[in-house]
Amino acid sequence: MADQRQCRLCKQPISGRADKIFCSATCKSQYHIKLNKVTMNASERIDKILHRNRSILFEIIGKNTSQKRIERQELDAKKFNWQYITHYHINTHNKLVNYIYDFSWMIFSDQKVLIKKVG
């Protein structure tokens, strides 16, 4: 019975071990280089948004304040991207607390935002 396996990158026939997925070390290397490039492009774009959001929060709260309550429109005016966070949790009052690195924020029903510097 002929071996019908094909290289994941170049689609050439593969011979050798049954679990082999590339025809050569070159194809394996090129595949992982392309995969890493796609991953890096996505993560760099997202990281840029996260860093910009953090800069906005830092600019508003300043160096000498650990928390500040502001209007949501102030963040909207600075083009704060609400969709990107590093993590979140639900606090003891059942409120969603969003984080970007060392800053957190909560949105209240009156559209006020509490920004805190964590740590």
Image (spheres, rainbow, N blue to C red):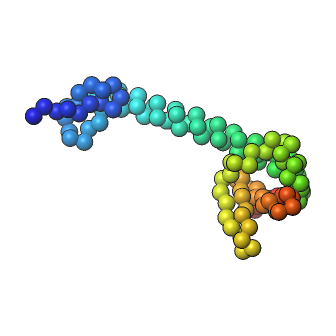
Q: How many marks?
A: 0
In terms of depth relative to the viewer, which is nearer, 99 or 118?
99
Which image quarter: residue 107?
bottom right
List x then y, in percent, for residue 68: 88, 59
In terms of depth relative to the viewer, which is nearer, 78 or 21?
78
List x then y, in percent, for residue 84: 68, 48
Residue at image coords 53%, 38%: 39
Residue at image coords 71%, 56%: 99
Indicate whether 88 appears above or below 92: above
Residue found at the very far bottom of the displayed protein? 92
For the C terminus, the image quarter is bottom right
Residue at image coords 46%, 31%: 33
Residue found at the very far left of the displayed protein? 1
Residue 58 visible? The answer is no
Relative side of 81 to 29, left or right: right
Residue 108 visible? The answer is yes
In terms of depth relative to the viewer, which is nearer, 109 or 12?
109
For the N terminus, the image quarter is top left
Relative side of 107 to 34, left or right: right
List x then y, in percent, for residue 64: 89, 57
Which image quarter: residue 21?
top left
List x then y, in percent, for residue 27: 35, 28
Which image quarter: residue 4?
top left
Indicate whether 109 appears above or below 42: below
Residue at image coords 76%, 58%: 104
